Amino acid sequence: MLSTAALRAHLLAARLAGPVTTSREESLRRYRLFAARDPRVLLGLDPEYDWSFTELLRLMGSKCGVSVNPAHVSGHDVIDPERTIAALQIFADRLRVAAETRAPVLLGTGHPHRLLGFYAALASALSAAGCPILTPADGRCVDITTRFGVRTYQLTYVRGVAMVREPGARPTASEPGAHSHSPLPVRVALACAAESGGPLPGLVIGDHGWVCGAGQLGFAAIGLADTDDPALFVGEAEGQVSVAVPLDDAVRSGYYRPLTRYVLNRACLSQ
């Protein structure tokens, strides 16, 4: 069992919280883009409120612990580990309820090279507790707008976790899928589930567009978010996202294993 003190120490040592690798410049740039409602940073969310840059900065200070001083424009961003731990507890509570009710669960990630192991462990534990792990639209093609133009990706599942790959790409241990912020894959998956008459998820777990896209459609959604992804925290503030856990989402995949143990233990799902 990982204690809260040990988790806090790990968060700081692994730079999951505290000074993180995400730059202050990038976070501020994306807050401005969000305030301008740039779809690249909305991640499928349609905010009810017109968030200004200043309001976003205050929100991110409250949710993540970043500096609310607009004159602080360079260096590394900072995440308060206490906020991460508090959000992980709520995250675990949501997992526990899903397990108790045997709710169908859909998991997806835009960071498969970093977070696949974290989500796959959750999928395994929830499945063992009796939750159906959904895999709708497996193999379907999804056209996603990128900085290189519209590119076609394939929706696929690995160990119960959805992601996208370029068609014909062979997965490797270090690069099982493509990095993506798009909400289109979760929209395709949910539409396919509805059209087939199969079960719809009682809970969606993931990051980026998987959380915001599902939350915007009214599904309970929980996930992880870095300081440069304000959409999840806006969604949480407005009620579309159930839980957004602030942490660096791009450190080594092995650094997330203690978080897995902590969350599953708190959710009474340790295997």
Image (tube, grey):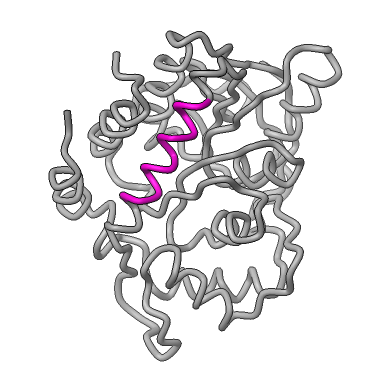
Residue depicted at 26% across the width and 28% down the height: 261
Q: Nearer the viewer, residue 169 or 61?
A: 61
Vertical order, 18 against 53 (above or below):
above
Placement of 233 over or under 198, stated as above or below: below
Q: Is residue 96 magenta?
A: yes
On screen, residue 200 versus residue 21, left or right, reads right
- Range covered by the magenta-colored residues: 85-97
Residue 217: % across, % down: 76, 41
Relative image position of residue 139 (x, y in whole percent) = 68, 17
Decide whether residue 43 is among the magenta residues.
no
- Residue 30: give x, y in percent of width and height: 55, 69
Instruction: Give percent across and percent down for residue 204.
Output: 59, 32
Asked if 12 appears above or below 69 in the picture, the reply is: above
Q: At x 60% / y 29%, what residue is drawn? A: 203
Which secondary structure type mostly characterizes the magenta part of the structure?
Answer: helix
Left or right relative to 218: residue 104: left
Q: Quadrant of the C terminus?
A: top left
Along the viewing direction, whichever of 52 and 152 lies nearer the viewer: 52
Q: What residue lies at 65% left-to-right and 52% top-to-bottom?
A: 43
At x 24%, y 33%, the residue is: 254
Of all residues, the one furthest to the bottom in this rendering is 71
